[in-house]
């Protein structure tokens, strides 16, 4: 990279730090209200609705979205309270997977939001891939041939979530922590109740932040009940 390129990169980095600092200040001042607006903005990131309009008019109608390939069109009419979480193009996949594995669709959707903000092409620094951020070895074990395919990713992620819920006797917070840190990352720390602040503090900082993202998303969508009702029906 030449000198001009280096200067440009430094200016971009400086601008991004400024934006991040400002966002942190706003969040500290407004709390969940700002998070709710940010959630809605991210849900509509592919729409033509201006970001300012989403903040000033949080009740604006959602943009139309195209159903993913392979999704059942009949699921569009079976969203119920799930629709309070805001529309996503992948809602039919979340609902289908929920019915397949007996899970609450809103819980699967919350995981997808926390993992990738509904971006099927997302890749993390650790190599996790797709909507549900499956690690390569996990995708292989699940028989997921293409972790960037939304349908395969959601199905695989829902299976992993279901396994963790079974392991932790239906405790959604423990299952979610295991989804992020692995089951051993929870059990090896002797954690049994993540509603206890002292026990939650034993989790890695990344996992604590992960749980907070899910809780904030569900709270903003008035769907916090999902954590007490992780199963379908």
Image (cartoon, rainbow, N blue to C red):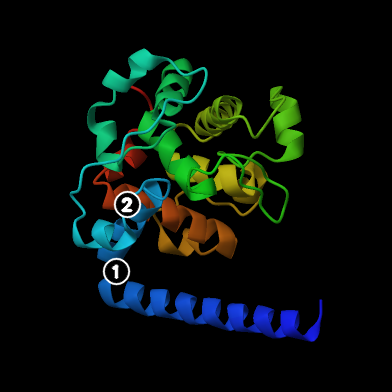
In the figure, residue 17 lies in which quadrant? bottom right
The spot of residue 150 in percent (x, y) is: 56, 30
Task: Indicate whether 37 appears above or below 168.
Answer: below
Q: Does residue 171 appear in the picture of this structure?
A: no
Q: Nearer the viewer, mark 1 or mark 2?
A: 2
Label 1: which secondary element: loop
Label 2: which secondary element: helix
The spot of residue 169 in percent (x, y) is: 47, 32
The spot of residue 182 in percent (x, y) is: 64, 44
Quarter of the image for the N terminus: give it: bottom right
Q: Does residue 6 appear in the picture of this structure?
A: yes
Q: Which residue is mark 1?
A: 31
**What separation in Å lies between label 1 and label 2 (alpha carbons)?**
15 Å
Q: Foreground: 194 or 144?
A: 144
Task: Indicate whether 184 appears above or below 151.
Answer: below
Q: Are marks 1 and 2 in contact (CB under 8 Å)?
A: no
In the figure, residue 108 lies in which quadrant? top left
Task: Indicate whether 104 appears above or below 171.
Answer: above
Task: Indicate whether 208 appears above or below 133.
Answer: below
Q: Residue at the location (29% across, 69% down)?
A: 31
Q: Residues within 10 Å of mark 2 (few under 14, many from 20)?
A: many
Is 199 on the left-hand or right-hand side of 3?
left
Q: Residue at the location (56% across, 39% down)?
A: 131
The spot of residue 187 in percent (x, y) is: 61, 46
Q: Foreground: 139 or 23?
A: 23
Q: Residues within 10 Å of mark 1 (few under 14, many from 20)?
A: few
Q: Residue at the location (18% across, 49% down)?
A: 59
Q: Which residue is mark 2?
A: 40
Q: For residue 214, which numbered disc appears in the image?
A: none
Quarter of the image for the C terminus: give it: top left
Does label 1 or label 2 sit earlier along the sequence?
1
Outermost residue, right side: 1
């Amino acid at each position: 990279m030449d000198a001009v390129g280096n200067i440009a990169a430094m200016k971009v980095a400086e601008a991004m730090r400024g934006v991040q600092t400002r966002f942190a200040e706003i969040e500290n001042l407004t709390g969940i209200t700002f998070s709710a607006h940010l959630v809605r903005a991210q849900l509509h990131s592919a729409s033509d609705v201006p970001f300012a309009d989403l903040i000033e008019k949080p009740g604006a109608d959602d943009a139309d979205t195209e159903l993913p390939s392979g999704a059942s069109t009949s699921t569009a009419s079976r969203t119920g309270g799930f629709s309070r979480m805001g529309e996503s193009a992948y809602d039919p996949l979340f609902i289908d997977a929920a019915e397949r594995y007996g899970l609450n669709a809103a819980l699967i959707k919350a995981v997808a939001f926390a993992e990738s903000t509904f971006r099927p092409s997302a890749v993390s620094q650790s190599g996790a891939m797709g909507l549900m951020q499956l690690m390569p070895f996990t995708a292989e074990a699940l028989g997921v041939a293409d972790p960037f395919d939304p349908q395969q990713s959601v199905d695989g992620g829902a299976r992993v979530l279901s396994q963790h819920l079974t392991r932790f006797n239906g405790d959604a917070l423990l299952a979610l922590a295991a989804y992020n840190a692995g089951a051993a990352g929870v059990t090896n720390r002797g954690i049994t109740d993540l509603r206890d602040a002292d026990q939650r503090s034993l989790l890695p900082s990344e996992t604590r932040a992960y749980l907070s993202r899910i809780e904030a998303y569900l709270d903003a969508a008035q769907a916090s009940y999902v954590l007490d009702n992780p199963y379908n029906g």
